[in-house]
Image (tube, rainbow, N blue to C red):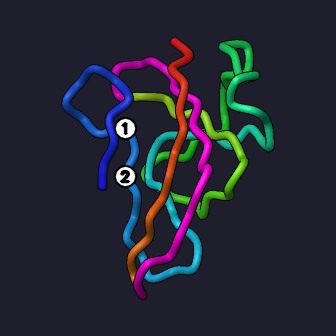
Protein backbone atom coordinates (compact mmCIF):
# COMPACT_ATOMS: atom_id res chain seq x y z
CA UNK A 1 0.00 0.00 0.00
CA UNK A 2 1.25 3.47 -0.77
CA UNK A 3 0.26 6.79 0.76
CA UNK A 4 0.80 10.27 -0.61
CA UNK A 5 0.89 13.09 1.94
CA UNK A 6 1.96 15.63 -0.68
CA UNK A 7 0.06 17.01 -3.64
CA UNK A 8 2.18 15.16 -6.18
CA UNK A 9 1.52 11.84 -7.85
CA UNK A 10 4.54 10.19 -6.22
CA UNK A 11 3.90 8.12 -3.12
CA UNK A 12 5.54 9.49 0.01
CA UNK A 13 5.54 6.27 2.04
CA UNK A 14 4.87 2.63 1.30
CA UNK A 15 3.74 0.03 3.81
CA UNK A 16 5.69 -3.13 3.14
CA UNK A 17 3.83 -6.47 3.15
CA UNK A 18 6.80 -8.31 4.54
CA UNK A 19 6.59 -11.56 6.43
CA UNK A 20 7.69 -9.99 9.73
CA UNK A 21 6.00 -9.58 13.09
CA UNK A 22 6.03 -5.78 13.00
CA UNK A 23 5.13 -3.53 10.07
CA UNK A 24 7.83 -1.77 8.10
CA UNK A 25 7.47 1.48 6.21
CA UNK A 26 9.55 2.49 3.24
CA UNK A 27 9.92 6.26 2.95
CA UNK A 28 12.05 9.30 3.60
CA UNK A 29 11.35 9.73 7.30
CA UNK A 30 13.09 10.29 10.60
CA UNK A 31 12.14 8.94 14.02
CA UNK A 32 11.61 11.67 16.64
CA UNK A 33 10.51 9.51 19.57
CA UNK A 34 7.44 9.06 21.73
CA UNK A 35 5.30 12.17 21.63
CA UNK A 36 1.67 13.17 21.19
CA UNK A 37 0.99 13.93 17.54
CA UNK A 38 -0.92 17.04 18.61
CA UNK A 39 2.25 18.40 20.24
CA UNK A 40 4.43 18.06 17.12
CA UNK A 41 5.14 21.35 15.36
CA UNK A 42 7.47 22.58 12.59
CA UNK A 43 10.30 23.17 15.07
CA UNK A 44 10.43 19.35 15.54
CA UNK A 45 11.41 18.77 11.89
CA UNK A 46 14.89 17.17 11.92
CA UNK A 47 17.59 18.54 9.63
CA UNK A 48 19.17 15.09 9.24
CA UNK A 49 18.64 11.42 10.04
CA UNK A 50 16.15 10.61 7.30
CA UNK A 51 16.05 7.14 5.80
CA UNK A 52 16.37 7.02 2.04
CA UNK A 53 15.37 3.98 0.03
CA UNK A 54 15.33 1.96 3.24
CA UNK A 55 12.80 0.93 5.85
CA UNK A 56 12.67 0.25 9.54
CA UNK A 57 10.23 -1.51 11.76
CA UNK A 58 7.92 1.12 13.17
CA UNK A 59 6.64 1.23 16.72
CA UNK A 60 3.17 2.11 17.98
CA UNK A 61 3.09 5.50 19.71
CA UNK A 62 6.36 6.71 18.19
CA UNK A 63 6.31 9.78 15.95
CA UNK A 64 8.05 9.89 12.58
CA UNK A 65 8.45 12.89 10.28
CA UNK A 66 8.38 12.24 6.56
CA UNK A 67 10.04 14.52 4.00
CA UNK A 68 7.46 14.34 1.22
CA UNK A 69 8.14 14.25 -2.51
CA UNK A 70 7.05 17.90 -2.90
CA UNK A 71 9.38 19.14 -0.11
CA UNK A 72 6.67 19.41 2.55
CA UNK A 73 6.78 17.53 5.86
CA UNK A 74 4.22 15.28 7.55
CA UNK A 75 4.35 13.86 11.06
CA UNK A 76 2.78 10.43 11.48
CA UNK A 77 2.25 7.96 14.29
CA UNK A 78 1.13 4.34 14.20
CA UNK A 79 -1.87 3.99 16.49
CA UNK A 80 -2.74 0.41 15.67
CA UNK A 81 -1.23 -2.71 14.20
CA UNK A 82 -2.65 -6.15 13.68
CA UNK A 83 -0.93 -8.99 11.86
CA UNK A 84 -3.77 -10.51 9.83
CA UNK A 85 -1.84 -13.16 7.93
CA UNK A 86 1.63 -14.57 7.56
CA UNK A 87 2.67 -11.63 5.38
CA UNK A 88 -0.21 -9.17 5.87
CA UNK A 89 -0.73 -6.35 8.34
CA UNK A 90 -3.53 -3.93 9.15
CA UNK A 91 -1.93 -0.64 10.15
CA UNK A 92 -3.72 2.48 11.40
CA UNK A 93 -1.84 5.78 11.03
CA UNK A 94 -2.65 9.27 12.22
CA UNK A 95 -0.83 12.12 10.55
CA UNK A 96 -0.45 15.87 10.62
CA UNK A 97 0.89 18.15 7.89
CA UNK A 98 3.68 20.38 9.18
CA UNK A 99 4.47 22.50 6.13
Q: Does residue 75 show up magenta in the picture?
A: yes
Picture disc at residue 88: none
Among the 4 quarters of the image, the one containing residue 31: top right
| Residue 77 locus on image (x, y percent) | 61, 42
**Which SS class for mark 1?**
loop
Residue drawn where x is 57% and y is 37% of the image: 76
Q: Mark 1 highlights which residue?
A: 12
Name above or below for residue 56 compared with residue 32. Answer: below
**Residue segment shown in magenta:** 69-86
Identify the residue at horizontal 73%, vertical 13% (top origin): 43
Magenta part, dominant SS: strand
Q: Is residue 86 above or below residue 27?
A: below
Q: Look at the numbered disc 2 and give the secondary structure of its residue.
A: strand
Mark 1 and mark 2 in contact (Cβ < 8 Å)?
no
Name the residue rendered at 52%, 80% in the picture.
Answer: 20
Q: Is residue 62 left or right of residue 34?
A: left
Gap between marks 2 and 1 measured at Cα? 7 Å
**Quarter of the figure that contains the N terminus:** bottom left
Query: Residue 61: x and y, percent?
Result: 72, 49
- Residue 60 falls in which quadrant of the image? bottom right
Q: Which residue is mark 2?
A: 14
Placement of 6 over or under 23, stated as above or below: above
- Residue 90 in the image: x percent, y percent? 44, 64
Q: Position of residue 91 (x, y in %)?
A: 48, 58
Amino acid sequence: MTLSFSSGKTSDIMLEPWCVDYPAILGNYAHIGVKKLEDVNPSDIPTSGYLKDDSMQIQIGHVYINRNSDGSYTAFVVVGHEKIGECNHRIVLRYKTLS
